[in-house]
Image (spheres, grey):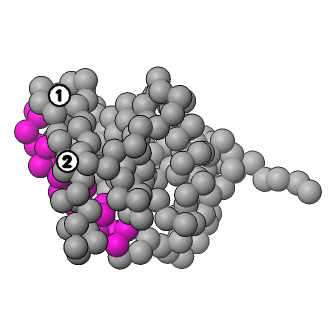
Amino acid sequence: MLKRHWTAQDLHDLPDDGNRYEIIDGRLFVTPSPSLVHQLAIGELFKLLTAYVATQPGLGLVVLSPADVTFSDTRVVQPDLFVAPLDNGRIPRDLARIKHLLLAVEVVSPSSARADRVDKRWLYREEHVEEYWVVDLDARAIERSTPDQPRADIFAERIIWKPVAAKASLEIDLASYFARILDD
């Protein structure tokens, strides 16, 4: 059986059908539209990260999916949420200018678990994404990976994020975060 080697250009030919299309090392990944609780989880993190980034002048920009991050012609992903550094001190005016991420976040679902925990974790390590978070709503935990760690750390009580260029840390109380999303 012949396997197709997908490229960034091939993505432009795919239908706008509500699915998310990503390419990792020439392989096509298709993910259905996210659930409501998935969107609530990302929305809550977006609020927390946006408020934090606003207190750290010159740090970066928080972006929600759908937004392509093109690392190469065979590596195009759409993290649920990401923080990109500024481009020469300014907000990037085009997604194509974003080649590095300070943080990438995915909310894991049954259809995306392998891609999020294996394929994307590997890709983000190779692309030197400073931190990668996998939000697990069922476990009420966040898995954090960095390029220099072979395994993910799992946080259930709180997670702290402090990018290199930041003057202060962001601390998220995970029990409160999950309670707001899951309506406890």
Amino acid at the residue labelled 2: Ile
Amino acid at the residue labelled 1: Ala
Name the residue located 36 percent from the left edge and 53 percent from the top edge: 141
Q: Main SS of the magenta segment? A: helix
Is disc 1 surrounded by few (<14), some (14 to 19) or many (20+) residues within 10 Å? some
Q: In this view, does 83 lie above or below 127?
A: below
**Quadrant in which residue 131 is drawn:** top left
Is residue 43 shown to the viewer in this render? no
Name the residue located 66 percent from the left edge and 55 percent from the top edge: 28
* Inter-mark Cα distance, 1 to 2: 16 Å
Q: What element carries label 1?
A: loop
Residue 50 lies within the magenta run: yes
What is the quadrant of the C terminus in the image? bottom left
Name the residue located 55 percent from the left edge and 60 percent from the top edge: 112
User: Which sits in the foreground, 10 or 120?
Assistant: 120
Q: Earlier in the sequence, mark 1 or mark 2?
A: 1
Report the span colored magenta: 37-58
User: Which sits in the foreground, 151 or 3?
Assistant: 151
What number is the disc on residue 166? 1
Q: As drawn, is 11 to the left or to the right of 41?
A: right
Q: Is residue 52 above or below residue 128?
A: below
Q: Name the residue under label 2.
A: 172
In the rendered image, residue 86, in percent from the top left (x then y), is placed at 25, 34
In the rendered image, residue 26, in percent from the top left (x then y), is placed at 68, 45
Q: In this view, does 180 lie above or below 58?
A: below
